[in-house]
Amino acid sequence: MSTATERCRCFGILVLAWVGLGATLSGRGAPLSETDGALHLRLPSPSLEVSGLPWYGEDAPVLRRLPERLRGTFRAPVWGLAQSPSGGRIRFRTDSSRLAILARNPNSSTMHHMTSVGQNGFDLYVDGEYRQSAWPDAQGQIEREWTLGEGRAWREVTIYLPLYKPVTVERLTFEPESKVASPSPFALPRPLVFYGSSITQGGCAANPGLSYAAIVARAMRLDFVNLGFSGNGMGEPEVAKAMAEIDAAAFVLDYWANPSADVYRETLPPLVAVLRLAHPQTPILVIGPFWFPGEATSADLRAGQEAKRRFGREFVAARRREGDRAIRFVDGLEMLSREQASGLVDGVHPNSLGFHHCAVGLEPHLRRALGWRSGRR
């Protein structure tokens, strides 16, 4: 047999093996969407919990991060970014071994420094472990079937929603005669609430489940709300008032990247005042700047970063002296330092490694703020 013929034969075997693997991964047989008796659920549904979107109860089935009733109070860019459901999750328990999702993304374009999955896609976690993802086709349709496990057994399922694009979930489909129930509760009944810039929103994580807010919340078994607004985390009172509506376990103010040092000094005190008026005892963590490689070559950038870091530290210290013992300062250099700069995709935004660094650095501060021991709760 010639070498070329042998190569063709081997390639054919490889293709057949891949097709067979695909059939195995999809659970074999007809797609769930075409299976007689399959269980189809649409949002909203009592069995499907939507977490991380505090106003979903009043705006369902729209998946957005700020409420429609306050739309006129926000700047247009903030409202537009709020349509991207970063931090939103669909949670449930099921005994189905397969799950299919059908969703639509009206604008599935891709930024140069971020993956399509992170911007437009979904992540599937089963019993706390990452399994697979889904992303839109050229027409913006997301249709994917996932295998949850072997055989019928109850499993905890979490689907992370896109970080940077609006999406409509049309249905979830389960095997015939399967059961779907509410998910297990979080370690605390109230969520962590993060406010900030594109860094907070999740730029530039490779996957929807890899923003630093998602990583640290998953590690602590907590719910979280992501109110990061790319390029528009400016400490505005309108957003502060909306945040104050949330009964939070803790507020994390991480918006240093967008305002100038002067604007940061002007906006941080009233932002904290709005939150304190509604939540006198809730922990507030003020995050200072992490490392930007540009600081190594720009004295102006370095001075601006240090001015914001210094003001945040001094402001928190002053409030603590005045009796507010529930506010803390976190130096962003503990989240991403100069030595960890390879965790940045463009010298500004973290990649997935950078978000891991941020989560690991922040977690001990959150645990102390919540009164938890340093180990797992």
Image (cartoon, grey):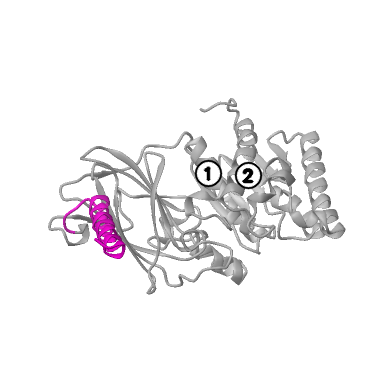
Hey, which quadrant is residue 44 in on the image?
bottom left
Residues 81 and 61: in front is: 81
Q: Which mark is residue 358?
A: 2
Q: Amino acid at mark 2?
A: Cys
The reply to whether the C-beta atoms of the residues labelled 2 and 1 are less than 8 Å apart is yes
Give the mark, 2 or 1, whose residue is nearer the N terminus.
1
Judge from the rendering whether residue 48 lies leftward or rightward of residue 283; answer left or right: left
Residue 236, position as x, y percentages in the image: 68, 60
Q: Most prominent secondary structure in the magenta stretch?
A: helix
Q: What residue is at 52 percent from the left and 49 percent from the top?
A: 210
Residue 41, position as x, y percentages in the image: 26, 56
Residue 158, position as x, y percentages in the image: 39, 47
Q: Residues within 10 Å of mark 2 (few under 14, many from 20)?
A: many
Span highlighted in magenta in the image: 1-30
The quarter of the rendered structure image containing the N terminus is bottom left
Hey, which quadrant is residue 6 in on the image?
bottom left
| Looking at the image, residue 373 lies above or below residue 35 | above
Q: Most extreme residue toward the bottom, as rendered?
A: 139
Dot 1 falls on a residue whose secondary structure is helix
Q: Which residue is mark 1?
A: 215
| Looking at the image, residue 127 lies above or below residue 124 | above
Judge from the rendering whether residue 158 lies leftward or rightward of residue 253; answer left or right: left
Dot 2 falls on a residue whose secondary structure is helix
Hey, which quadrant is residue 141 in on the image?
bottom left
Q: Residues within 10 Å of mark 1 (few under 14, many from 20)?
A: many
Q: Amino acid at mark 1?
A: Ile
Q: What residue is at 79 percent from the left and 42 percent from the top?
A: 313
Residues 107 and 318: in front is: 107
Residue 220 colored magenta?
Answer: no
